Amino acid sequence: MIKKILIGLLAGIICGLFSTGGGMILVPAFMYILKMESVESRATSVCCILAMVLASSFFYYKSNYIDWNAGLLCAVGGIIGGYIGAKALGKIPDYILKILFVIFLIYSSIIIVNSS
């Protein structure tokens, strides 16, 4: 139980600081620390992310940081994309998902470093 709370705490801090949702912390922690299967780890992280996003969104809202027009339009796309991704999750081999995730992280890192 302590491991699960600590994983959630770390993911929540990362979510609050970097607005990532915590999936970069949760999925590997679920797989390697809690020994969950890959698909179960991803599905469980989505459940956890919802709570973290709601909590951090409240504080962003209170600080007037939210662009509602962009946020709501992206949310519509996110709902559709989330549905497509969830349907595809069980059909894509785990090693392909890992490769795609690493490519995504590298690409995102390059974009962030170059924007500084």
Image (cartoon, helix red, strand yellow):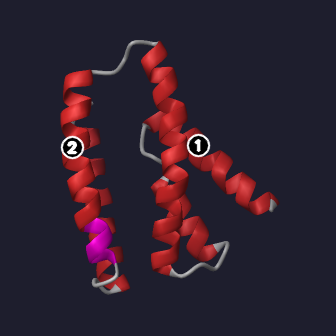
Percent coordinates x, y for residue 61 in the rendering: 43, 19
As displayed, is residue 71 above or below residue 64?
below
Q: Is residue 111 visible?
A: yes
Q: Amino acid at mark 1?
A: Gly
- Please give the name of the residue rendered at 46% of the width and 58% of the height, measured from the top-left corner: 46
Q: Which residue is mark 1?
A: 12
* 59 with respect to 70 (left or right): right
Residue 32 within the segment the image draws in magenta? no
* 62 with respect to 88 (left or right): right
Q: Principal SS element in the magenta part?
A: helix
Q: Which residue is mark 2?
A: 76
As displayed, is residue 30 above or below residue 52?
below
- Please give the name of the residue rendered at 63% of the width and 48% of the height, measured from the top-left corner: 10
As displayed, is residue 20 above or below residue 100?
above
Quarter holding residue 13? top right
Give SS at disc 2. Answer: helix
* 110 vs 67, nearest the viewer: 67
Mark 2 or mark 1: which comes first in sequence?
A: 1
Percent coordinates x, y for residue 21 in the rendering: 45, 46
